[in-house]
Image (cartoon, rainbow, N blue to C red):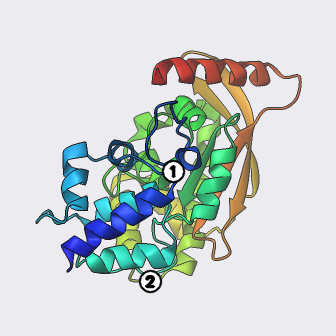
Amino acid sequence: MDLPELGAFLRSRRDRITPAEVGIVPGPRRRVPGLRRDEVAVLAGASVEYYTELEQGSKVQPSAQMLGALARALRLTSDERDHLYRLAGRPVPARGGDTHVEPAMLALLGRLDDTPALIISDLAETLAANGLARALLGERQGLPWPRSSQVYRWFVEPESRGVHPGPDHDRLSESLVADLRMAAGRRRADEARLAELVARCTDASEEFAQLWEARAVKLRRVDAKTFLHPVVGSLDLLCHNLYTDDGSQHLLWFTAREGSDSLERLALLQVVGAQAMA
């Protein structure tokens, strides 16, 4: 553990990132080329005081979860992320299937500002989302494991299904479990988080248990879903997926068909989301 070097490393990475790279509009009186401490704190979900102590190399020892959030906020590469964990004296997460998002994928997400878009792990965790996705689906980041997985919420907290109409639920259940079976094939059989997710869902849901035993596998590339939004109403959207080479993460974005009511409602959702953020 080297906390002073950890602080210096964080400062160097903060100075390197421009506001535009993380979706921040720089004001006319900005005095630094990179991000300010308060901006990094907001992006990482930390208090400004806490982040300031980290940069000052105090005795604050960040958790693995906080290190992951800082790595995403500062757009660290996998090598830089690993270095950050070592400086903090934390075990370096295994490559593949973890929750670190490469800067290139985050940069692509940042360009999709007129359509809902998310980056999701193979365990159905939302790792990053743009404002329009949060307006459509609500805030899904920062939940504790295993609630952070949509699979868990879908089968253990059935009230979460209200975002989709009832007749679609069976199909979506099958799709979620088939996706998870694909993830199980890529991961170690004894991978702790996967094993816990399957066990918790099996105990809570007979539906999940039956689908899991069926062993269907399918990688979703293009799909169609109906979303029920409390303000703009029903949206029929096409779902597109772009996967990393190892399949451990994918970029998911939604589009509406030209000339459809959903296209107009998607435009209205953008206004509603902007008003909510304001």
What amino acid is at disc 2?
A: Ala
Which residue carries the number 1 mark? 128
Outermost residue on the left side: it is: 59
Q: Residue at x 51, y 56 (%)?
A: 17
Give coordinates of residue 67: x percent, y percent. Answer: 32, 64
Q: State which tag comes first along the sequence, 2 or 1.
A: 1
Residue 207 is left or right of residue 136, and the answer is left
- From the viewer's perspective, is residue 48 above or below residue 64? above
Question: Which quadrant holds residue 241?
Answer: bottom right
Q: Tag 1's secondary structure?
A: strand
Residue 28 percent across, percent down from the top left: 52, 30
Left or right: 88, with 166 as reference point: left
Q: Nearer the viewer, residue 22 or 28?
A: 28
Q: Which residue is mark 2?
A: 189
Q: Secondary structure at mark 2?
A: loop
Q: Residue at x 55, y 71 (%)?
A: 183
Task: Name the image quarter holding residue 218.
Answer: bottom right
180 on left or right of 14:
right
Estimate the spatial distance between the alpha carbons at disc 2 and disc 1, rounded to whole Å.
27 Å
Quadrant showing the N terminus:
bottom left
Give the x, y percent position of residue 122: 54, 65
